[in-house]
Image (spheres, rainbow, N blue to C red):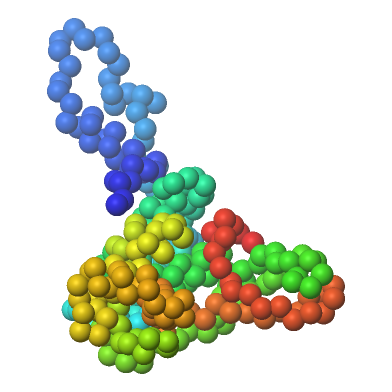
């Protein structure tokens, strides 16, 4: 899903240059090319390293991993005996990769690639969707500060309000039950029991559009009552009520654990109380 990152910094380039020079064959007698060790003819690798080490000495401590409790408390990851995951702040090179791909069809790949490099924990592709979303918000908090500022129009008067939301105060619902790769839900109208799968990062490529989400929904259902036949499941979904399908959709895409992104604010112009969900927009990974 992710291509090899070819972004290199000046230290990487200097090291490669040094290795190339040390492995090069000796010049034949009579070759009038300048001596590669002559002053000013090659980068002074050690000088560059020392200069960067000095310039970045106050930054290194900010690139360490901070542990946060996962909403799932790590229960979905066999062999991972921790409730926490480590998150480090973005570097400028990370921000560039996200911004350069924000408007393209590879935006999700770019974000996932950067996010994976900023985490220390379970296999990234095995993260459940609520855990991944949680890590995105924590990454934003560590990189730019807790205050997330964004505009929001009032539903009453259409006045544009400036919302200052504190990411550090976001409510987290932790997984209370034992982990399962599937969730059981009783459907409100048919009264039937359905068992649905737990979605993970590796499943995201099947959900890139609203159309994909709608069409792929039956594929996340393991069984309806005792029936596992795909034809029966597909026909049941087509024939049941929208309330039943809404219950299935909620169990699959909005499990009970994870972040509570709901937020209320009062319009500064008309005083109306507005409700919103704090989402991710094009400026989410950018200084407020």
Q: Is residue 46 visible?
A: no
Q: Quadrant of the C terminus?
A: bottom right
Question: In the image shown, does 23 or 143 lie closer to the viewer?
Answer: 143
Query: Where does the image place residue 73, in percent across and percent down from the top left?
Result: 34, 84
Q: Nearer the viewer, residue 78 or 39?
A: 78
Position of residue 192 measured from the top left corner of the image (x, y, whole percent):
32, 87
- Look at the image and tell me whether residue 148 can be seen: yes
Q: Position of residue 105 (x, y in %)?
A: 44, 46
Above or below, 7 against 174 in this view is above
Is residue 56 placed above or below 226 in the rendered structure? Answer: above
Q: Quadrant of residue 116?
A: bottom left
- Taking the spot 23% from the left edge, 29% from the top edge, the residue there is 21
Q: Position of residue 228 (x, y in %)?
A: 20, 76
Give the residue furthest to the right: 270
Nearest the eye: 193 or 91: 193
Quarter of the rendering containing residue 284: bottom right
Q: Which residue: 82% across, 79% down?
A: 271
Residue located at (30% from left, 16% from top): 34
- Most foreground residue, 193 or 127: 193
Q: Pick out the residue farthest to the bottom.
A: 176
């Amino acid at each position: 899903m992710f291509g090899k990152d070819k972004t290199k910094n000046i230290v990487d380039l200097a090291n490669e240059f040094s290795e190339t020079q040390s492995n090069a064959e000796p010049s034949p007698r009579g070759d009038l090319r300048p001596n590669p060790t002559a002053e000013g003819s090659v980068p002074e690798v050690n000088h560059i390293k020392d200069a960067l080490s000095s310039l970045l000495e106050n930054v290194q401590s900010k690139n360490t991993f901070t542990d946060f409790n996962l909403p799932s408390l790590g229960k979905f990851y066999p062999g991972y005996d921790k409730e926490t995951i480590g998150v480090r702040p973005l570097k400028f090179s990370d921000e560039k990769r996200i911004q350069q791909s924000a408007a393209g069809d590879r935006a999700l790949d770019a974000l996932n690639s950067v996010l994976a490099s900023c985490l220390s924990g379970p296999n990234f592709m095995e993260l459940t969707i609520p855990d991944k979303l949680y890590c995105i918000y924590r990454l934003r908090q560590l990189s730019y500060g807790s205050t997330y500022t964004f505009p929001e129009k009032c539903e009453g008067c259409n006045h544009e309000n400036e919302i200052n939301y504190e990411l550090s105060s976001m409510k987290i619902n932790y997984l209370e039950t034992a982990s399962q790769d599937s969730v059981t839900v009783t459907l409100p109208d048919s009264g039937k029991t359905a068992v649905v799968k737990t979605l993970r990062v590796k499943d995201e490529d099947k959900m890139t559009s609203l159309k994909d989400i709608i069409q792929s929904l039956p594929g996340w259902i393991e069984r309806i009552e005792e029936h596992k036949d795909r034809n029966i499941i597909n026909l049941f979904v087509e024939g049941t009520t929208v309330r039943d399908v809404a219950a299935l959709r909620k169990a699959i895409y909005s499990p009970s654990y994870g972040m509570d992104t709901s937020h209320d604010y009062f319009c500064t112009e008309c005083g109306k109380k507005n409700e919103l969900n704090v989402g991710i927009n094009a400026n989410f990974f950018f200084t407020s």
